[in-house]
Amino acid sequence: MNLIDSMAQSPGLNAIGWTLLHFIWQGLLLAGAGALIIRLLRGRTASIRYVATCAVLAIMAMTPLVTFFLLAGPTHSTGLAAGPAAPLAPDGRMIRLADSVEDWIDRPIDESDGSDWIGSLSRTLDDSVPIVVIFWIAGIVLFSVRLTGGWLITIRWTRQLTSEAPRELRLAVDRLRQRIGAMRAVRVLMSARLDVPCVVGWFRPVIVLPEAIMGLPPSYLSALLAHELAHIRRHDYLVNLIQCAVETLLFYHPAVWWISSRIRAERENCCDDEAVRLCGDPFGYARALLHLETTRPSQVRLALSAADESLLSRIRRVLVAESPRPLRAGSAAPMLCAMIIILATIVPWVRRRVTR
């Protein structure tokens, strides 16, 4: 017996494979709801959009877990054409039930009526489940190596390629930290290898600054430091790690990468708003961001920097200085209805499919 045959006979691996297949349509449905929510919240604050997109990603992460536990249950059945046993007519033939769309989909397959494509599709997917699981495991390994490499790079940044920041810079960070509010102590390091400031670590956060930043005007420097301190106060490094884990586990679905990119964009917008609030000079902060446009770092997702995402769109947003509308109960109703519809659709559908 080869590896694929062995995997096909494993109930746990079979449930994993079908969970991955089910998430294809589930992820598309969630992405559509996320796009609708983002559109409804276009005129709201960045923090509200950030929370909403994080909620969508959290549901994306939980949906495969719910699906797996349902599929791995004692009444597990994954075939697409599986359904309740149809009653028999007096002559022994099965009666076709068409009282609802669900009954029509789940009716016994009769090759004479041209519906055998459903059974063929089910058998094809059953045969491909082991290959799907192998592909998924290989992808997790590759993306885990990528994630580990990024983590090792950040460790090298903070331990080998840095030096302590000048005293006046550390004092400036302390003053800004007190203005932001209660926050743990923050270490400040300098690096000749980096082009932009970034934050590394969550439990013991470190701000790593490029040595060239010392040539900036004090107002520019304060604005960029305020942006990095906002990341620390909001615990963005931890959220970013969770994002990376979800991206690694669900790497095969474009919807996960899309909503994750929206989260990163709104995260930077939130920190931009905090930096402008502390500095009180949106034009000065925009000039500081513009200074970073010519030197963009390589994308290392385990570090949070002020040059993440689309810098030009962030500059435009800061300069426009729109007055965001607060979220009211009436305007939140469409978003809540969308999320309820998603959950009410996915969970009962999967439960019906696996408990028959």
Image: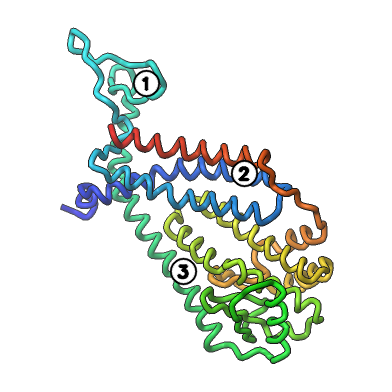
Rendered image quadrant of residue 83 = top left
- Look at the picture and state if 197 lies above or below 1: below
Which residue is pictured at 73% across the width and 68% down the height?
Answer: 275
Please name the residue that numbered disc 3 is placed on: 146
First in sequence, mark 1 or 3: give its number. 1
Which residue is pictured at 81% across the width and 66% down the height?
Answer: 282
Secondary element at image label 3: helix
Q: Position of residue 192 (x, y in %)?
A: 64, 86
- Name the outermost residue toward the top: 90
Q: Position of residue 256 (x, y in %)?
A: 51, 52
Q: How far apart are marks 2 and 3 (CA)?
A: 31 Å
Q: How far apart are marks 2 and 1 (CA)?
A: 33 Å
Please name the residue that numbered disc 1 is placed on: 104
- Left or right, 289 with respect to 64, comes to right
Q: Which of 93 and 113 is in front in this view?
A: 93
Q: Which of 352 and 249 is in front in this view?
A: 352
Q: Residues within 10 Å of mark 2 (few under 14, many from 20)?
A: many
Q: Residues within 10 Å of mark 3 (few under 14, many from 20)?
A: some
Is label 1 or label 3 in front?
1
Q: How far apart are marks 1 and 3 (CA)?
A: 46 Å
Please name the residue that numbered disc 2 is placed on: 37
How many labels were placed on the picture?
Answer: 3
- Look at the picture and state if 163 lies above or below 136: below
Which residue is pictured at 36% across the width and 60% down the height?
Answer: 138
Is label 2 or label 1 in front?
2
- Look at the picture and state if 62 lies above or below 183: above
Q: Which amino acid type is shown beneath numbered disc 3?
A: Arg
First in sequence, mark 2 or 3: give its number. 2
- Name the outermost residue toward the left: 1
